[in-house]
Image: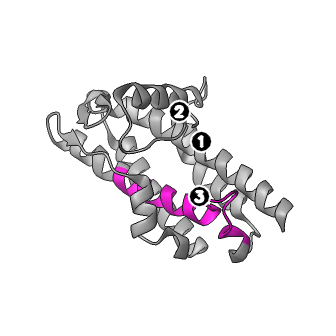
Amino acid sequence: MSVFTNPASSSAEQAEAYTRAVLGLVGSTDPLEILEHTPKALRTAVGGMSPDLAGRPEAPGKWSVRHVLRHFADSELVWGYRLRMVMAHDRPILTGYDQDAWADRLHYDEADIDETVEEFEVLRRANLRLLQQASADGLKRVGVHSERGDESVEHMIRLYAGHDVLHLRQIERIRVAVSDSA
């Protein structure tokens, strides 16, 4: 199992390893630049891809590009809620969620590619607007993640930037795998 696998039932050690690995994907790049660039990178990554190929997983039991796109949009929705909770409340609890249950029960395999990317773009714009309006003190505000503990807005910015990098790379990998098998 990869360090980037993030099951809902993971131990504190697994959650910590996942967080370190995702943060490491940001490197010395400004995380806000990554967050701002991701919508365009996502459009480029799936440009010209047929719905058939977008629906093919890279291997049995793995996600397809369609799944990853839907995960991007739903993760952005969750992050927006978490940001708003942390910025408006004192040390709110940030509930984790089972991404595989969401993918299954929310029918990620049926997602429309273009609609999903558009939804992600709208949500990302709203979240970036919120961050641009945040004060220095606002960026230091903390929520308590149910699996990972204290997370400041600054930390979440880096974490979601790394999450973007992780899943953009995943889309590239899946696209190559399903194109080779076509």
Amino acid type for the residue under numbered disc 2 = Val
Local secondary structure at mark 2: helix
What residue sits 59% from the left and 49% below the top? 38
Instruction: Identify the mark nearer the N-term, 2 or 1.
Output: 2
Q: Is residue 101 left or right of residue 93?
A: right
Residue nearest the viewer, comparing 116 with 182: 182
Nearest-to-viewer mark from 3 and 1: 3
Q: Which residue is mark 1?
A: 166
Local secondary structure at mark 3: loop
Instruction: Identify the mark nearer the N-term, 3 or 1.
Output: 3
Badge 3 density bin: few <14, some 14–19, many ≥20, Cα 10 Å: few
Q: Is residue 65 left or right of residue 16?
A: right
The vertical placement of 141 against 129, above or below, is above
Badge 1 density bin: few <14, some 14–19, many ≥20, Cα 10 Å: some
Segment tinted magenta in the rendering: 53-78
Q: Is residue 163 left or right of residue 157?
A: right
Taking the magenta stretch, the answer to whether it contains residue 171 is no
Q: Which residue is mark 3?
A: 61
* Residue 57, percent from left and from top: 66, 62
Amino acid type for the residue under numbered disc 1 = Leu
User: How far apart in space, not on screen, are marks 2 and 1 (Cα)?
Assistant: 7 Å
Badge 2 density bin: few <14, some 14–19, many ≥20, Cα 10 Å: many
Instruction: Identify the mark nearer the N-term, 3 or 2.
Output: 2
Disc number for residue 22: 2
User: How far apart in space, not on screen, are marks 3 and 1 (Cα)?
Assistant: 19 Å
* Residue 161, percent from left and from top: 52, 39
What residue sits 60% from the left and 31% below the top? 25
